[in-house]
Image (spheres, helix red, strand yellow):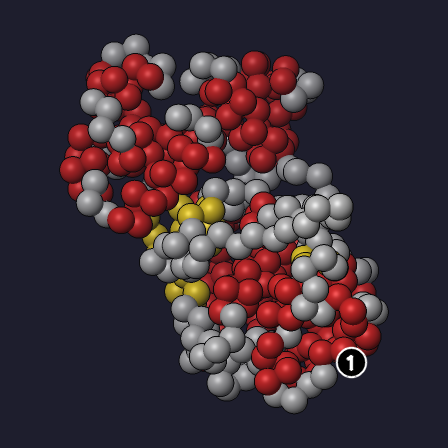
């Protein structure tokens, strides 16, 4: 609207109204919930008003407590907070993120028939955590998917003591937009595929072996008492893995498809040995990150373009077709031609490939 200015860091009032639909349907007053969360009720339903990431956490927690429902009244049968507490306790007894994830999925399926989480494993494509949320008709399912994915991202990042290195998200609905320019999905710092067949988070294999940094319910309660900001990167600044990925992608855009660890370290203003050590502490390896990023881009070219395989290899800096084929097979478990033949008609993979090319601004 002409004459109005917006900050680009807030969830607008229309999204706030959508988030409170389940509570309102159960007879709760939206104004009372907002006031209890320390938020001006005038924000409700107003696209020119907004809340920040700390206010969002307070509002979600207040709504959950008011309803005694983890899922904010979006399911026909709610899930009591006492069950959520038992789930958190069971997760904290695990040794690694991978173990905690699988325990969480089993526990969630026992808690609610409307959540429907599952994991599928795909070589070269990470671990897919799908969520089949069955919301009440008439409620905004998309806002629930977003807030639950946001909770998953922040909770598990907190649990391992550093940001999860998400490989991507799949979202069934269209990209949401706000007049203030706030991108709800930029928070996840990964490619997002909209209008996808399923809602899913894609985890990096290296994160599955990450040890847990917290092991008690008191730690969990202290985390919320600290007033976390869900619009910020978990744990503050990006980790070494994310910084290394960004440096590699920047070098890719400059035409350097296989940068040395020395080149990346120089870009990050550190030394190669320190970079390797810091990556190792995060459960990552420079060579694996470099191979994966190049493999993801090669796979995207194979599915989202009709460029000949040989030309793709040359475009990505391989000196000969044999070298490209061998390295791609090491990443994907099959040759480039076999990959294109097998997945060329897969609509889900095609959408993902298109998103990768768009995200990396290759075309």
Relative depth, front residue between 70 and 211:
70
Percent coordinates x, y for residue 160 in the rendering: 62, 52
* Residue in the image at 64% along x and 46% along y: 181
Q: Is residue 170 visible?
A: no
Q: Quadrant of residue 90?
A: bottom right
Relative depth, front residue between 56 and 210:
56
Q: Is residue 197 visible?
A: yes
Percent coordinates x, y for residue 309 in the rendering: 22, 23
* Residue in the image at 73% along x and 44% along y: 236
Left or right of 339 in this view: 283: right
Report the number of numbered marks.
1
Q: In the current view of this chain or complex, which residue is farthest to the front?
A: 2
Percent coordinates x, y for residue 265 in the rendering: 61, 19
Q: In the current view of this chain or complex, which residue is farthest to the bottom?
A: 27
Q: Quadrant of the C terminus?
A: top left
* Residue in the image at 35% along x and 19% along y: 316
Disc 1 is placed on an element classified as helix
Q: Quadrant of residue 173?
A: bottom left
Left or right of 269 in this view: 152: left
- Crowding around mark 1 (Cα neighbors within 10 Å: few <14, some 14 to 19, many 20+) is some
Percent coordinates x, y for residue 17 in the rendering: 64, 70
Relative depth, front residue between 285 and 66:
66
Relative depth, front residue between 185 and 336:
185
* Residue in the image at 49% along x and 85% along y: 76
Q: Quadrant of residue 94?
A: bottom right
Left or right of 151 in this view: 329: left
Q: Which residue is mark 1?
A: 32
Q: Is residue 280 above or below residue 47?
A: above
């Amino acid at each position: 609207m002409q004459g109005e200015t917006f900050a680009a860091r807030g969830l607008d009032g229309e999204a706030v109204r959508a988030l409170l639909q389940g509570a309102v349907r159960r007879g709760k007053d939206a104004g009372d919930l907002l006031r209890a969360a320390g938020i001006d009720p005038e924000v409700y339903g107003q696209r020119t008003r907004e809340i920040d990431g700390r206010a969002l956490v307070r509002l979600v927690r207040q709504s959950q407590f008011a309803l005694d429902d983890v899922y904010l009244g979006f399911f026909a049968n709610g899930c009591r907070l006492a069950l959520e507490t038992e789930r958190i306790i069971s997760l904290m007894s695990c040794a690694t993120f991978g173990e905690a994830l699988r325990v969480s999925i089993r526990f969630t399926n026992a808690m609610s028939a409307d959540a429907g989480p599952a994991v599928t494993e795909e070589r070269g494509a990470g671990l897919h955590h799908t969520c089949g949320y069955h919301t009440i008709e008439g409620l905004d399912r998309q806002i629930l998917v977003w807030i639950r994915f946001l909770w998953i991202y922040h909770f598990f990042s907190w649990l391992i003591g550093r940001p999860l290195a998400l490989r991507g998200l799949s979202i069934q609905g269209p990209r949401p937009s706000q007049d203030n320019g706030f991108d709800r999905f930029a928070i996840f710092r990964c490619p997002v595929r909209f209008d996808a067949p399923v809602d899913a988070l894609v985890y990096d294999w290296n994160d599955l072996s990450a040890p847990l940094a917290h092991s008690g319910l008191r730690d969990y309660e202290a985390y919320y008492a600290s007033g976390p900001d869900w619009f910020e990167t978990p744990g503050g600044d990006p980790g070494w893995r994310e910084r290394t990925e960004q440096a590699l992608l920047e070098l890719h855009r400059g035409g350097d498809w296989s940068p040395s660890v020395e080149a990346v370290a120089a870009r990050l203003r550190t030394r190669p040995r320190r970079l390797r050590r810091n990556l190792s502490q995060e459960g990552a390896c420079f060579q694996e990150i470099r191979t994966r990023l190049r493999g993801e881009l090669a796979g995207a070219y194979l599915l989202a373009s009709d460029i000949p395989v040989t030309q793709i290899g040359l475009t990505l800096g391989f000196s000969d077709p044999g070298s490209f084929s061998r390295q791609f097979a090491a990443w994907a478990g099959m040759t480039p031609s076999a990959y294109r033949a097998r997945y060329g008609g897969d609509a889900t993979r095609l959408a993902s490939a298109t998103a990768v090319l768009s995200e990396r601004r290759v075309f």
